[in-house]
Image (cartoon, rainbow, N blue to C red):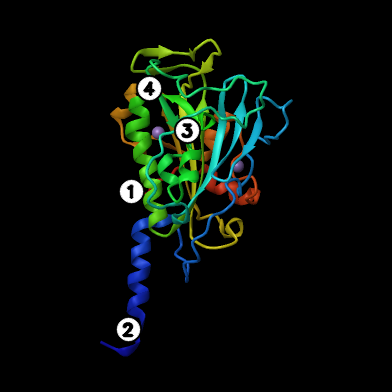
Amino acid sequence: MKKSLLLLLPLIIFTSCYEQVGGGNITPPEVVGPVTREDNMLMGNPSGATNDILNADNYLMVKPQYSLSYNNTKHTANWVSWHLSSAWLGSIDRQDDFRADLSLPVSWFAVQNYSFSKSGFDRGHMCPSADRTASVGDNSATFLMTNMIPQAPDNNQIPWANFEMYCRSLAEKGYELYIISGPQGVGGTGSNGYTETLGSAAIVVPKYTWKVVLVIYNGNNDISRVNEKTRTIGIWMPNEQSASTKPWYSYRVSVDFIEEKTGFDFYSKVPADIQKVIEARIDNVAI
Ligand code: MN
Ligand code: MN
């Protein structure tokens, strides 16, 4: 073998590895950057939420582990936003300490750890427990009830959970992800049948669960590295037991579809011409 080819060989192997992981939509960088934790809302605030008690249905809550817009009429988040890279991942066990979020304004109803019990719906994490395993505090924060929606068990535990695992597998392979998820609509079908609200406070059971994910290689200056080729994945899944009859990847939609349904603007910090391209595409990477 020629000496010049031998020198190139590590680069060729390196490049083909990343192509396998990312499908055709991500151009491998010359150098994979440092693994960092980033602002959970770096790509934007999808609903212009503010931390103002008068803005009760679009109330911004910023935590070290995730940020969310809380809706005090629905008693669930409108959306939860978080960054995922291997810098958030460790070996801490699931804390399972479901509890009311005492950082809500004290005059508001707070969903309790038992508020969904016997309803036929899971306490479905938006920011998953397994995305925050580097410290006990990080993992425990995911069990606050403001991070939970009433989620049909066969949605939550099967296709939804499988997509969460897929996202973590990308984080473990050199990517960082910006993820936003939430509930939409009223009325789901859990293990006890169709239900619209839970309890006397009428916690809204959503009709759909959705998620948008932006995937880039590990590195710095993340917004500036988003371009027209950047991979985005939208997921729109009925909050029904029957959701488990299809794999997660058959629920892929464009980010634009979810923007239309929810009225939110995702990735608003990304230049509009780039948003236009990456939000219109339906991810078709072979899974
Ligand atoms: Mn879950
Ligand atoms: Mn957008």
Mark sitting on residue 163: none
Where is residue 209? Give x, y as percent: 46, 29
Q: CA distance from mark 2 to mark 4?
A: 55 Å
Residue matched to label 1 = 286
The tag on residue 210 is 3
- Mark 3 and mark 2: span between their CA atoms? 47 Å
Determine whether label 3 and label 4 are within 8 Å by CB. no
Decide which of tag 3 and tag 1 comes sooner along the chain.
Answer: 3
Q: Quadrant of residue 21?
A: bottom left
Cβ(mark 2) to ligand 2 < 8 Å?
no
Seen at 52% across and 63% down, the residue is 219
Residues marked 3 and 1 touching at CB (< 8 Å): no
Q: Position of residue 263 (x, y in %)?
A: 61, 30
Query: Gap between marks 3 and 4, in whole Å?
Result: 13 Å
Residue 223 in the image: above or below residue 156: below
Q: Please, what secondary structure does the residue beneath circle 3 have?
A: strand
Seen from the viewer's position, the closer of residues 45 and 116 is: 116
Check disc 2 and report its element: helix, strand or loop.
Answer: helix
Per the rendering, the mark at residue 240 is: 4
SS label for mark 4: loop
- Which residue appears at 53% of the width and 17% of the height? 203
Ligand 2 in which quarter? top right
Which residue type does callout 1 highlight?
Answer: Ala
- CA–CA distance in space, label 2 to label 1: 31 Å
Q: CA distance from mark 3 to mark 1?
A: 20 Å
Q: Around disc 1, counting alpha carbons within 10 Å, would you say few (fewer than 14), some (14 to 19), or many (20 or more)?
A: few
Is residue 136 toward the left or the right of residue 60 in the image?
A: left
Q: Is residue 112 or residue 74 the one in the foreground?
A: 112
